Amino acid sequence: MADRRLKVFHTVAKLLNFTKAADALHMTQPAVTFQIRQLEEYFNTRLFDRTHNRVSLTEAGQRVYSFSGRIFELYDEMEHSIREMTGDVSGVVTLGASTTIAEYMLPFLLGDFKTKNPEVNIRLKVSNTDGIVSMVENNIIDLGIVEASVSNKNLQVDVCRMDQLVVIMPPEHELTHFDAISSQQIISYPFICREEGSGTREVIAEYLQDNGIKEEPNVCLELGSPESIKSAVEAGMGVSIMSQSTVQKEIKLNTLVAIPLDPPLERPFSFVHQRHKFKVRAMEELLEFAKQYCIAHPGK
């Protein structure tokens, strides 16, 4: 409802990057630049300095940014108040999820939520845990769901459920003879892991350190998604550690074997949002629904 030019300006000012702002707004970069130019013409002053490939706010831009933040908070509060009065649950919620959650948990959760709340539109952004936390911090998304711990004390973190991680390997691998696998055994084999910034990789590293493993795993591949890791393991390129919920199909088809770790390895799936951000009703409904869904479906 707020002025589109002001919304574009606020996003660019927050990120200080036209390309990232265009991506966050689902616009092209020339369209973002055009909106900023229109606003600068309206105020008859420059709002950004663009020098040496860097973007910074002018003094006028800093004032507009301060006011725009307060304006959008008031818009959100007004919409929330009216919808609360009318009982209407609608609007847009921008949700972010790390890869494992987006691929294996959210399709079921969001399908059920949309059935009950057809007027709520959900935009989903997928990144690794570091990327999702950054988007929450910068107000690019309303709510994040991540698979690793969050250190920013200004964010509200609520655990959704616990997720068990297991060692995966092809059926002919020699480790399939064990009922459980130790961290010492893991580092003896070629290991396939996620990229830097992944919540799964961070949890595995902490687990190995906590169990006295000082040497690095014998990493033979770094891959960016659970599906690519599963394919590499099926091809016999190495072993890996993944969420048990991501390999159910492969276990049934006998293309992969999953064995628990000893001691067991669990991690939390958590909701993350800004602690003091005003929440629109659609986001509150989604957050409450997701919490109840996790209680009712601990394995999905």
Image (cartoon, grey):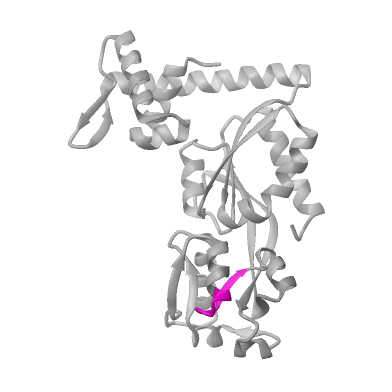
Q: Is residue 236 highlighted in magenta?
A: yes
Above or below — where is 161 with respect to 145?
below
Relative depth, front residue between 157 and 233: 233
Residue 123, percent across and down?
59, 36
Give the mark count: 0
Above or below — where is 123 with respect to 89?
below
Could you tell me which residue is drawn at 49 percent across and 35 percent down?
Answer: 139
Above or below — where is 63 with respect to 132?
above
Could you tell me which residue is drawn at 70 percent across and 25 percent down?
Answer: 90
In terms of image quadrants, where is residue 262?
bottom right
Residue 188, percent across and down?
49, 88
Lateral position of residue 257 relative to residue 214, left or right: right
Relative depth, front residue between 300 and 231: 231
Residue 168, percent across and down?
61, 76
Could you tell me which residue is drawn at 77 percent across and 17 percent down?
Answer: 86
Q: Quadrant of the N terminus?
A: top right
Q: Which residues are magenta?
A: 233-242
Q: Is residue 278 highlighted in magenta?
A: no
Residue 285, percent across and down?
73, 35
Lateral position of residue 23 relative to residue 166, left or right: left
In terms of image quadrants, where is residue 60?
top left
Could you tell me which residue is drawn at 25 percent across and 18 percent down?
Answer: 46
Q: Quadrant of the C terminus?
A: bottom right
Above or below — where is 26 with respect to 74?
below
